[in-house]
Image (cartoon, rainbow, N blue to C red):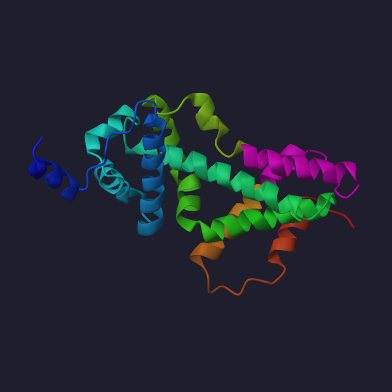
């Protein structure tokens, strides 16, 4: 191949072919590019096959070997975001010792911090749920995978609340249902803080939500 041909490919920003067996790395690069585009633009419509391919340095058709469409890329971004959320909840509660109420509070605060620090990903994690059925129909994700979105984070709240009940610190008679209610309360607060940043929120609003919905007792 001539030097001219090589130089023209380099100037176009094309990516060198991955060595055999490293296709998984390209898949991760595609997902990373999608997440970055979402964070930067604040609009999931900016995550197109062309924009992702341009950022990774490949041709748009090359993506089809890994993802059938842009929705599949966004879904993987959402899956990774939920995994990150769960990791942050576990890390936060692990920092406060063994007291079940403090662990629950730490997880709740970590949830709100994730929503604050990852606003675009957080929005798509939940606003994008309406597309999950289409993703299943397109075979981008299995029905089980779609149903599992967010369940790891919910299980963390259920486990914490169950421990609060066992320690006599909560009067909940259905930790699963009350953990769902607590998540809804936190989600509502996270959303309203995002859309109404100038609202004079009570300083103890998070504590009020936790105590009330988790049925905590002194």
Q: Is residue 146 something that shows in the picture?
A: yes
Say if 121 sits above or below 21 in the image.
Answer: below
Confirm whether the magenta stretch covers residue 99.
no
Horizontal arrangement in the rendering, residue 1 relative to residue 17 (left or right): left
User: x%, y% of residue 192?
Assistant: 55, 62
Query: For residue 64, what is the image quadrant?
Result: top left
Task: Say whether residue 193 is left or right of residue 154.
Answer: left
Q: Residue 99: horizontal and vertical position, in percent?
A: 85, 52
Tell me if residue 130 can be seen: no
Q: Is residue 152 left or right of residue 13?
A: right
Question: Residue 132: horizontal and vertical position, in percent?
Answer: 44, 35
Q: Residue at x 73, y 40 (%)?
A: 158
**Is 181 or 136 nearer to us in this picture?**
136
- Identified at 70% across, 53% down, the residue is 92
Find out whether residue 157 is within the magenta segment. Answer: yes
Q: Nearer the viewer, residue 53 or 137?
A: 53
Taking the image as shown, residue 123 lies to the left or right of residue 27, namely right
Q: Above or below — where is 188 with respect to 85? A: below
Magenta span: chief secondary structure: helix
Which image quarter holds the N terminus? top left
Please give the range of residues in magenta. Answer: 152-181
Residue at x-position 58% and y-position 40% = 150
Viewer-proximal residue among 9 and 47: 9
The C terminus lies in which quarter of the figure?
bottom right
Tally of marks = 0
């Amino acid at each position: 191949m001539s030097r001219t041909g090589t130089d023209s490919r380099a100037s176009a920003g094309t990516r060198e072919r991955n060595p055999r067996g490293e296709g998984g790395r390209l898949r991760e690069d595609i997902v990373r590019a999608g997440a970055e585009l979402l964070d930067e633009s604040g609009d999931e419509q900016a995550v197109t096959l062309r924009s992702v391919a341009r950022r990774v340095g490949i041709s748009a058709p090359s993506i089809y070997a890994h993802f059938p469409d842009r929705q599949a890329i966004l879904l993987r971004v959402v899956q990774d975001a939920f995994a990150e959320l769960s990791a942050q909840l576990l890390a936060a509660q692990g920092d406060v010792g063994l007291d079940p109420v403090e662990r629950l509070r730490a997880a709740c605060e970590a949830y709100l911090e994730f929503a604050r620090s990852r606003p675009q990903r957080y929005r798509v994690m939940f606003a994008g749920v309406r597309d999950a059925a289409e993703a299943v129909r397109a075979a981008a994700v299995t029905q089980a995978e779609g149903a599992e979105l967010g369940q790891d984070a919910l299980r963390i709240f259920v486990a914490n609340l169950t421990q609060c009940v066992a320690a006599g610190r909560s009067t909940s008679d259905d930790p699963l249902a009350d953990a769902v209610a607590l998540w809804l309360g936190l989600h509502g607060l996270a959303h309203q803080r995002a859309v109404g940043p100038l609202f004079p929120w009570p300083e103890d609003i998070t504590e009020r939500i936790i105590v009330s919905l988790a049925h905590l007792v002194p």
